[in-house]
């Protein structure tokens, strides 16, 4: 058989691996980030007192530097780790499923190829028998019903061979599908 692409090349497997890698990077970011990012706060205030007094405007600028605490980080790290565990489990499930599907499709293809070979042998033998019986009929040594049964059996064997060849094509198409190959 021809060599097939690795399971890691299957589009579904690449998607699962990419998702898991994205979650790993997010979890690493949560582990390295100890606090919220700094914030700059800008505000404008306009006071309009009464009729006589003039309005007062003020501008306020502030900087907030949050300090990282374990209380803040612990739930975020736990959530990131849980998400990472789920993504890695999904990746393993996809890998196992694709490997099982590939093994099943390979076995089905091999069995179908063996059945095609068996049908070829059967059709060939029945064709040969029909030819010999036809010669025997022409020589007057065989009866017509026996010749007709033999010809019908040879025709049925040919039809079974064609059906089995179609089944072999279907098994090959299923194998290609499990490999993630386009038709």
Image (cartoon, rainbow, N blue to C red):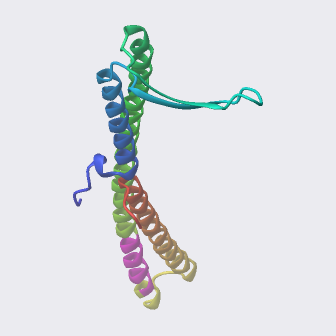
Quadrant of the frame with the C terminus: bottom left
Q: Position of residue 111 (x, y in %)?
A: 37, 53
Query: Which sits in the foreground, 116 or 91?
Result: 91
The residue lying furthest to the right in this view is 51
User: 22 or 60: which is nearer to us?
Assistant: 60
Dominant SS type (magenta) = helix
Residue 32 in the figure: left or right of residue 171: left
- How far from the left and from the top, in percent, is residue 179? 35, 54
Instruction: Please determine whether, in this image, residue 110 is positioned above or below residue 64.
Output: below
Pick whichever, 175 or 129, lies toward us.
175
Q: Residue at x 66, y 32 (%)?
A: 55
Which residues lie in the magenta part?
Answer: 123-134
Q: Position of residue 38 (x, y in %)?
A: 38, 26
Q: Quadrant where the N terminus lies?
A: bottom left
Residue for point 35% across, 49% down: 107
Q: Give coordinates of residue 25: x percent, y percent.
A: 32, 33
Taking the magenta stretch, the answer to whether it contains residue 132 is yes
Vertical relation: 52 (above or below) 18: above
Residue most extreme to the front: 52
Q: Residue at x 46, y 74 (%)?
A: 158
Q: Residue at x 55, y 80 (%)?
A: 148
The relative height of residue 125 versus residue 32 in the rendered view (above or below) is below
Q: In the image shown, does 5 or 31 lie closer to the viewer?
A: 31
**In the rendered image, the vertical position of residue 93 relative to residue 62, given as above or below:** below
The answer to whether 117 appears left or right of 148 in the picture is left
Image quadrant where residue 161 sits: bottom left
**Quarter of image, res 131:** bottom left
């Amino acid at each position: 058989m021809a060599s097939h692409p690795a399971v890691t090349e299957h589009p579904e497997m690449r998607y699962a691996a990419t998702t898991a890698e994205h979650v790993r990077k997010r979890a690493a970011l949560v582990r390295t980030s100890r606090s919220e990012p700094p914030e700059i706060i800008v505000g404008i205030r306009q006071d309009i007192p009464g009729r006589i007094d003039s309005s007062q405007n003020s501008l306020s600028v502030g900087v907030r530097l949050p300090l990282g605490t374990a209380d803040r980080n612990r739930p975020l790290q736990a959530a990131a780790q849980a998400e990472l565990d789920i993504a890695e489990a999904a990746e393993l499930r996809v890998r196992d499923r694709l490997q099982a599907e590939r093994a099943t499709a390979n076995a089905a293809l091999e069995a179908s190829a063996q059945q095609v070979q068996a049908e070829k042998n059967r059709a060939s033998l029945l064709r040969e028998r029909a030819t010999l019986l036809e010669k025997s009929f022409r020589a007057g040594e065989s009866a017509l019903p026996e010749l007709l049964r033999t010809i019908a059996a040879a025709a049925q064997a040919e039809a079974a061979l064609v059906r089995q060849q179609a089944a072999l094509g279907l098994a090959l198409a299923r194998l290609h599908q499990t490999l993630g190959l386009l038709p």
